[in-house]
Image: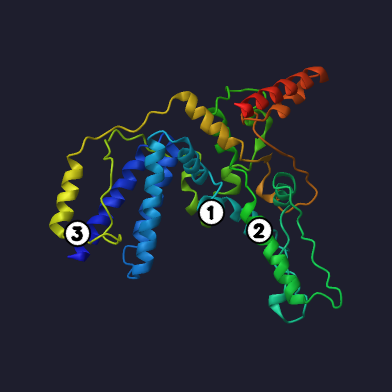
Amino acid sequence: MFHKLHSLYIKSLYKRLLTEGSLFFDERARLYVRNRVRSSFGNYKSCTDLERVKSKIKEARKQLHRLEKANKGCQKSAIKVLEEVYGLKGKVRHGLLYPYLKAHRPANFKIEFDPFVPHVPRTAPPPKLCKPLQVLIQKHLQKKIEPILPVPAYKPLHPGRRANLLWRYRSMLLNRVSVPLPFEIICELESKAGAPKDHPLSCSSLGKGGPKWDDFYSSIENAVIMMLHLQPNIKLPARSNLLRKETLFDSPYSKVRTPTLVEFLEEKKGNGREQKAIAFEYTPRRKRRLYQRLLAKIPLIDTFKATELWENTKTYTISKSHWAPQVVHQLLEDVPSQEIRDATLATTNKKTRRNRKK
């Protein structure tokens, strides 16, 4: 009986995730949710580890609640979904980062450095980073490439400890650095954020954003698997017209009393008779603002080819999209008069003081 409850609950959770994903306003997010749900449920279809199953159910419910809140108009949940879809976190980010670390290397490239202690591989330092990734760490992340190692007072730093500190710092950098999206996707996001076609400050006119998909990502299978939804010319699913239910019945693994099969089916049938609601409709203005907030977190870099990735002679500049929201003092940089700047900042400070008093 319990196995039957588990099977019904998994099927219901699977359908609910697909339904909520098909109602999201972004077409690439709809494709990402569909692919991610199908692959995740397929990978754990024959899993027999109960604790692993419970953990994956908890993770799936968390994603479902986030999609439900986003489809009801919660902008915080919507921006989290967009961040995951466009590679600011999660597996898509690993797919974007993979070519910078392990692909497009020249034939004479030395993968590993010699260890600090000969014939002891665990004392080897981390390998060298490509030039674009170094510039992203220094300019966008604002961190140094190499850490400042401690200097013991009475003895030299142990080689193994030195290697561990270098690897720990490298892991921290790779966990925090943001990677540019493909050039075609950046142009698409700017268009969704309100950029007019052929605008002189758009990425398509300036030639900035990131490497092009066909030249940089299409030949790397490990990266493409994680980011199929970011292919520029892939067919995107249309927004579904299905009506959704408001609630999902409790998991058979929850702490409450396990229901019988009859109670479980009655609860499911009762949820089906509830009033159904269409997903919240985002206005064009709200969509533009969400895409603008997303662009503010994505760095732009000069476009480069795969053959130029490991060349140290080329210089790169890091910038942000002109359609990303900026703070007041950044907008005032284009004003020629210093008096206008001071007057505007003074007015802003007065308003802040009034709000604090209230």
Q: Which is closer to the viewer, label 1 or label 3?
A: 3
Farthest-out residue, left: 262
**Residue 85 place in picture, x, y as percent:** 49, 44
- Look at mark 3 in the image and give the residue it sits on: 259
Q: Name the kind of residue labelled 3 in the image.
A: Pro
Mark 1 secondary-structure assignment = helix
- Look at mark 1 in the image and give the residue it sits on: 223
Task: Residue 204: name its quadrant.
Answer: top right
How far apart in space, not on screen, are marks 2 and 3 (Cα)? 46 Å
**Residue 329 place in picture, x, y as percent:** 73, 28
Question: Which sits earlier in the primary sequence, circle 1 or circle 2?
Answer: 2
- Look at mark 2 in the image and give the residue it sits on: 172
Q: Can residue 200 be seen in this view?
A: yes
Q: Is residue 137 left or right of residue 83?
A: right
**Residue 346 place in picture, x, y as percent:** 75, 22
Closer-to-camera residue (302/141)? 141
How far apart in space, not on screen, are marks 1 and 2 (Cα)? 21 Å
Q: Which is closer to the viewer, label 1 or label 2?
A: 2
Q: At 46% across and 24% down in the image, what residue appears?
A: 284
Question: Compared with residue 267, is residue 243 higher up or lower down, i.e. above or below?
Answer: above
Mark 2 secondary-structure assignment = helix
Question: Which sits earlier in the primary sequence, circle 1 or circle 3?
Answer: 1
Q: At 49% across and 24% down in the image, what residue appears?
A: 285
Q: Is residue 236 visible?
A: no
How far apart in space, not on screen, are marks 1 and 3 (Cα)? 44 Å
Q: Name the kind of residue labelled 1 in the image.
A: Ala
Q: At 61% across and 23% down in the image, what residue appears?
A: 198
